[in-house]
Amino acid sequence: MEFRLLGTVAVETYTGPLPLGPAKRRSLLAALLLSANTPVSVGRLTDSLWDDTPPSQARGVIQGHVSRLRALLVGADAEAYGVELATLGDAYVLRAPETLVDAQRFEELLMLAREQRSPGDTVLMLKEALSLWQGPALSGAFAGPPLKAAAHSLEESRLATVELLARTYGTLGEHHRAAALLSAETAAHPLRESLAAELMLALYRAGRQSEALDRFHRTRRLLADELGIDPGPKLADAYALILRGDPGPSAAPAARARVSSGPAVPSTASPASTEVGAVPVAEPPGAGDTAGAPPVVRHPPSSAQPAVHPADPLPVDLLPRAPRGFQGRTAELAALTRAAAGESPVCLVTGPAGVGKTALALQWAHRNEALFPDGRLFADLRGFSEAGEPAQIDVLREFLLALGVPPRRVPESAPAAAALFRSLTGRRRLLVVLDNARDSATVRALLPGGTDCVTLVTSRHRLEGLIASDAARPVPLDTLEADDGTALLAGVLGEERVLAEPVAARRLAELCGGLPLALRVTAARLAGRPQWTLAALADELADERGRLAFLDVDDTGVAAALRLTVQHLPPDAVHQFARLGHHPGGHVDPYAAASLAGTGPVAAAAALERLAAAHLVSETAPGRWVLHDLVRLYARGLDPAAAREALVGVLDHGIATALAAADTAEPGGEPCFVLPDGFRRPAAVRDFADRAEAMRWLSAERENLALAAQAARDAGLEDRAWRIILLQWPQVVWRVRDNWTPLLELALESARAGKDAYAESRVLTLLGWVLTEEGRAAEAAALLEHSPRLAREAGDPLGEATALINLAVVRAELGELPAATENCARAVELARREEDRHTEMLALQHLARMRLTARRPEEALAHARTALDLGPEHEEAARRSLLLAICGEAHLALGQEDDGVRLLDRAAREAEDAGYDEGAVRALEVLVRTTAEPSYRVRHERSALRLATAP
């Protein structure tokens, strides 16, 4: 009898494999085998068989699977092999000799391998260990969180063994064998940097230096495209060693050290980065040539921000300020302190809406600042907000930026960003506050990796899945007791006023349902009216509570308090408050508030201040206001008939402000479109001092603009929806791999719904370029094929030219060079007819590269010279370098070596002066192949090292 985990979960016998049946039964067996001879609780088995919330009959299902598995083992004479599936209280244990479990034999062979003195014997042991693998670990089982983690750990151990075997081959001088072994694994794990580094060294030592360098560049591009990161130290060191011609140290000691330290963890690139301060072109045409050059930029990289290294401890603090007037909750604060003790604790504060969960979490966080010397992170997950939850990648991006990761080094996918976040927090003492979580899965993806980190979660749900999977320690929060409620009133009104009417104060606390939100808005009304008695307000509140039905929630105390508060506000504040309920985004500034209310920003700011004094809105940052979810619902019900008018106002405000931002960020750029019919020009539009300020606004408002576009689409305002999305093109161009596709697809739906050929063409052009940059060339080509025709139908020649350039780029990438050349030539004609030098220059650059690729150097040279004569601005160093390099390569192809070398040297120097290392490497690579001048090799090595090791 043999138990298999290294492949499909199975039980092998002399008569064949046992019929284990469904995946959940295999999961049960896998969970028991992974802890063979150790009791496994029903709770742990439940986690292994179900991903999130298990069914109510989970225990019965597990008992049924155990019974069937026990019968199978008994029928296979398991007792003769010393195998027994036993029940121990609330747990089960599978007793079996370790020699019967392939995963245990694998580990034993690894131990034997590290004890061998002869590399040859080590190779034999390692090959025997790897022969036990028959596929991905735990295949055929349902992968609950514990089994996913176990499968990942086993795979990591296997890959570390492969790397060790390759290094041992290297010790024996069998570099070709090492390269063959690593090539297959690298193909299956292209993002694992340690594998790529080992393969590079094996190829190099086997005399295949060009293949080794090619492997580096392929891996570098893949890391950039898939994860948005640069090569890490292991990969960069291997590259530097090859460039130096250094044979490197013996691999044997390192190999032995790796075995003794356990399974290897995949190398991850250092997220620290020097920010590239270049600015994309004015239009959104896929700048960068067909050979993979980066987008063309305007401002030189010398304007970059200093590098930030997240490896260095950086104290961060994203916590909102401590709540004012916090009262009571002594027992809950103590419970949080107890829950926060231990290793990697997750503390879960639960309770109904308005009960003060966030206030409790923030109060505890501020009181215990000294426990977290590396800082405190905070995210509002908006699990119960109509504005919708933020994407996980957005939350992780904010955390990573706070930890010092430069924006361009933040991974684009949520799993990669979560892995980087866990890595960065592995050795820190941080507090992570996750507010308003809806479900367990959202929280799990945001948990830090350090054992000294504390995660504090608040939710209206119990999140039992988080309790089961991550041992979250719940701290339930109920409404305030009457004494604490009156203490809260006293904190706002003063003790004398409450002591003068203790019975009325207690009655108020009871009428507010013990909800801090209701108590605070009630106290705010009383604070500004010293002549009012608490008893009179209690009578009024009791009367209103019986009649109000404004909110479709159970918290009628909140509704009553809100109504009474609003009734005593001045008319302009009430009007502003009612219109705020129709805002589709998560926050407002005075300009957006003014657009909702049809006023000016000064009047809107005054109204917001008045509403803040009544605790109806909160200022989370200077000029940035938010409404509590329940308050938003109440405000929306005050004037439902104004919903469309308010929405149109805020949409047109967004269009006007985005136009101003785009014009400031890319001055002189072509306007994207005319204003929509019935456009309501705002009373005032925000001014932007410079490009940086405009780009900051576009970044900060990205979520609000996306929500506004979705609201416009839902309301049938398609002409606003696609405009408000397309106007974000400066941000799209600057951060092209930042998951813009869903938003642009919404714009495309809106353009098509409105039967607007101009809009559809413009959106397709930008979406196609984004897909190209994401490596989805076939999809991009299918979309871009329609864009030039639509632009012609719409009478948009420059739009047609831009579409043709983007289509040419993707066709060249797909190997359709004749069609790509034809597209570029047509784009040149259109740009010349419209006298648009910028678009003409861009088209000529791509056309020149394509002619060079087609071995037509005379034509390439002519096109590149024409583009240079159009006079690109001085700050376009990257484009100028690319054009000069094309000229130099064309001269070489024509046999004019002196001119070619001179122009390539000039291209390299201009790129070096601008900090454009990719351009320098490209030009110098050609020079190194062309001439024996040693200075070119030295400069190439330096540029390549800068590019490889750039943080």
Image: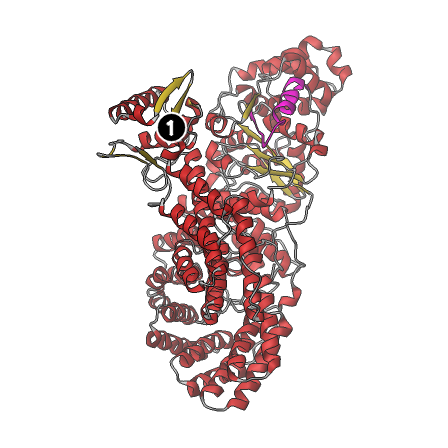
- How many marks can you see? 1
Instruction: Classify 10 Å Cα crowding around label 1: few (below 14), some (14-19), many (20 and above).
Output: many
* Chosen colour scheme: secondary structure
Where is 919 relative to 380, above or below?
Answer: below
In the rendered structure, the answer to whether residue 190 lies left or right of residue 435 reads: left
- Tell me which amino acid carries mark 1: Ala
Residue 562 in magenta stretch: no
Which residue carries the number 1 mark?
Answer: 96
Please state which of residues 52 and 797 is positioned toward the viewer in this rendering: 52
Where is 542 relative to 53, above or below?
Answer: above
Residue 329 in magenta stretch: yes
In the rendered structure, the answer to whether residue 781 lies left or right of residue 223 reads: left
- Residue for point 61% across, 75% down: 939
In the rendered structure, the answer to whether residue 110 lies left or right of residue 907 reads: left
Q: Quadrant of residue 576?
A: top right
Query: Residue 117: x and y, percent?
Result: 51, 51
Quadrant occupied by the N terminus = top left
Query: Residue 703: x and y, percent?
Result: 52, 46
Magenta residues (range): 328-349
Query: Residue 413: x and y, percent?
Result: 47, 49
Where is 571 relative to 917, above or below?
Answer: above
